[in-house]
């Protein structure tokens, strides 16, 4: 991803937000008292992080690299910082693995790492090879360079100063994602090239040859491509092509777009032209998916995580007062579902191991709501799950991280009349100065008259999974520390909230 940093720190303390909710104007102060470091989300130890790099599994651990800037906010340039985890929840920092400005090719940007088990590149069996973008000395062109590690991914060294894939003369030429194609027995690379994805092949990771391109319309400049196989619930094995994309101009998300189709080793053929979206929130970008390291069937499911931020307001966050700017989403499990006529879609759910953070739980079997009901339960780090049903309804949902005077809250629900689900952060602290990005929405069939919600709340975020997880929302929020209430609400009818379970999470070590 293209990286740009402001030359000076924004005067954060002067910023306030004005939001309109229920026809009443409220001033929102997004800088809560106390720590704003999330309790159970991955955050950079200090300074800045953005793009995740696809984690890999070896030696009993997941190894995760991400773009890090030690000089933020005064200086530019990213490097690859390293962390490890056995459960994808708690991570151990391992420091910088690929430093910036160590050769004439500049700082390392996004790419991917692979384990070269059969020594195709000649660095030894099991060498860890990274292919990544650097703005080379040749007029800053984005080109692909190889770095390799012979100490199990702790440190990397560059392979020559020349690119393994040179820029053919285009502006955008970055974010290589490399996989081993078991069917064609070769390495395959996907590369973000403006509004298209380029496909390349190699036998040795050092020499790459173009094979084809995939073009996308009306979703902006593509970044961070992704290519993998999943077995759907109907037994068919399908290919998925994913990208980080910006569909705001056509009312679509600015997150992770994907297509289901077929790949013959050279060309990807989608089942349909229009993309689907893995998240409908404002803050799920630069996403990567990766294999379950202990699952025997690698095609049954995958994991996914993303940078929890948005380039429209990436520099504005109260976490800077604590010396860091960079949080990831939780890790999700994703699966492929069929819906007939050769149509498929991805579903995602929080990984179950998160529930091991549970310190206590509250449960309500049956609550009828006509208007609003505030629970005798509060919290700022929890998972809330419920089934909601109704006969006639205009709007139904929950107000979370609510203040005692009920003026501040983040809303999750279904606007039945408008046939959409939503997350609305207009009435709580949030990072968007323009107030354009306060309500994220996704289509909902109002004839269903029921919905299942799974909601993850942390100190600075909310993640929502609708029904089977075909729809998900990820949004940053910055509530006041004392805003901890939970209210159920309806407009235009009575709803039954059943099987309400709130699992309160301990903070990670």
Image (cartoon, rainbow, N blue to C red):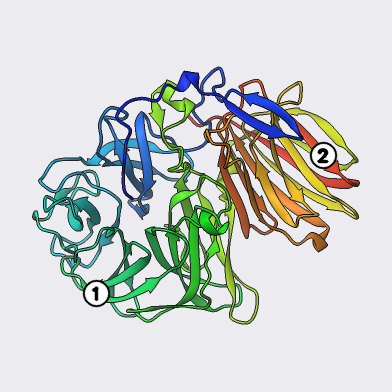
The quarter of the picture where residue 392 lies is bottom right
Q: Circle 2 — which element?
A: strand
Q: Is residue 30 above or below residue 33?
A: below
Horizontal side of 46 relative to 270 (left or right) equals left
Q: Residues within 10 Å of mark 1 (few under 14, many from 20)?
A: some
Counting residues from the N terminus, which is met first, the one under dot 1 or under dot 2?
1
Residue 478's x, y, as percent?
57, 29
Q: Residue at x 49, y 19 (%)?
A: 14
The quarter of the picture where residue 190 lies is bottom left
Q: Residues within 10 Å of mark 2 (few under 14, many from 20)?
A: many
Q: Is residue 410 above or below residue 204?
A: above
The quarter of the picture where residue 327 lies is top left
Q: Which residue is mark 2?
A: 489
Residue 45's x, y, as percent?
37, 30
Q: Residue at x 54, y 36 (%)?
A: 434
Task: Report the disc number at residue 439.
Answer: none
Residue 109's x, y, as percent?
27, 48
Horizontal side of 430 relative to 447 (left or right) equals left
Q: 440 or 364: nearer the eye?
A: 440
Task: Tell me if I can see residue 361 in this picture.
Answer: no
Residue 193's x, y, as percent?
31, 63
Q: How many marks?
A: 2
Task: Tell me if I can see residue 283 in this picture.
Answer: yes
Task: Report the disc number at residue 210.
Answer: 1
Q: Circle 1 — which element?
A: strand
Q: Is residue 177 above or below residue 498?
A: below
């Amino acid at each position: 991803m293209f990286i740009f940093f402001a030359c000076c720190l924004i005067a954060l303390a002067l910023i306030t937000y004005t939001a309109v909710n229920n026809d009443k104007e409220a001033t929102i102060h997004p800088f809560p008292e106390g720590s704003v470091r999330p309790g159970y989300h991955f955050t950079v130890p200090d300074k800045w992080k953005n793009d995740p790099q696809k984690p890999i599994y070896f030696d009993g651990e997941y190894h995760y690299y991400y773009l890090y800037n030690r000089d933020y906010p005064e200086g530019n340039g990213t490097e690859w910082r390293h962390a490890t985890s056995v459960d994808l929840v708690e991570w151990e920092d391992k420091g910088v693995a690929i430093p910036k400005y160590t050769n004439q090719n500049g700082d390392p940007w996004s790419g991917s790492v692979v384990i070269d088990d059969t020594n195709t590149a000649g660095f030894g069996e099991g060498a860890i090879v990274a292919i990544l973008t650097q703005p080379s000395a040749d007029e800053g062109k984005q080109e692909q360079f190889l770095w390799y590690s012979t100490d199990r991914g702790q440190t990397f060294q560059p392979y020559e100063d020349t690119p393994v894939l040179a820029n053919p003369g285009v502006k955008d030429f970055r974010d290589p994602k490399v996989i081993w194609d078991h069917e064609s027995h070769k390495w395959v690379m996907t590369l973000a090239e403006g509004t298209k994805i380029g496909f390349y092949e190699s036998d040795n990771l050092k020499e790459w040859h173009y094979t084809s391109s995939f073009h996308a319309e009306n979703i902006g400049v593509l970044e961070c491509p992704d290519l993998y196989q999943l077995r759907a619930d109907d037994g068919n094995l399908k290919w998925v092509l994913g990208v980080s994309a910006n569909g705001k101009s056509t009312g679509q998300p600015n997150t992770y777009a994907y297509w289901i189709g077929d790949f013959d080793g050279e060309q990807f053929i989608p089942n349909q032209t229009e993309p689907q979206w893995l998240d409908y929130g404002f803050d799920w970008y630069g996403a990567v998916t990766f294999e379950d390291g202990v699952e025997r069937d690698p095609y049954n499911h995958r994991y996914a995580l993303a940078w929890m931020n948005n380039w429209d307001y990436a520099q504005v966050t109260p976490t800077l007062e604590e010396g860091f700017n960079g949080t990831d989403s939780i890790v999700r499990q994703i699966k492929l579902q069929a819906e007939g006529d050769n149509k498929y879609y991805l579903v995602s759910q929080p990984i179950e191991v998160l529930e091991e953070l549970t310190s206590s739980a509250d449960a309500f079997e049956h609550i009828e709501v006509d208007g609003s009901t505030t629970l005798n339960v509060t919290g700022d780090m929890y998972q809330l799950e419920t089934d909601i049903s109704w006969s006639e309804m205009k709007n139904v949902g929950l107000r979370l991280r609510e203040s005692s005077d009920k003026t501040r809250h983040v809303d999750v629900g279904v606007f039945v009349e408008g046939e959409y689900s939503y997350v609305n952060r207009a009435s709580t602290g949030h990072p968007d100065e323009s107030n354009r990005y306060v309500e994220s929405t996704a289509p909902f069939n109002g004839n269903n008259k029921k919905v299942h919600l799974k909601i993850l709340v942390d100190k600075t975020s909310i993640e929502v999974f609708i029904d089977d997880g075909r729809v998900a929302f990820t949004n940053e929020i910055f509530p006041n520390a004392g805003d901890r209430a939970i209210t159920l609400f309806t407009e235009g009818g009575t709803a039954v909230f059943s099987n309400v379970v709130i699992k309160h999470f301990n903070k990670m070590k």
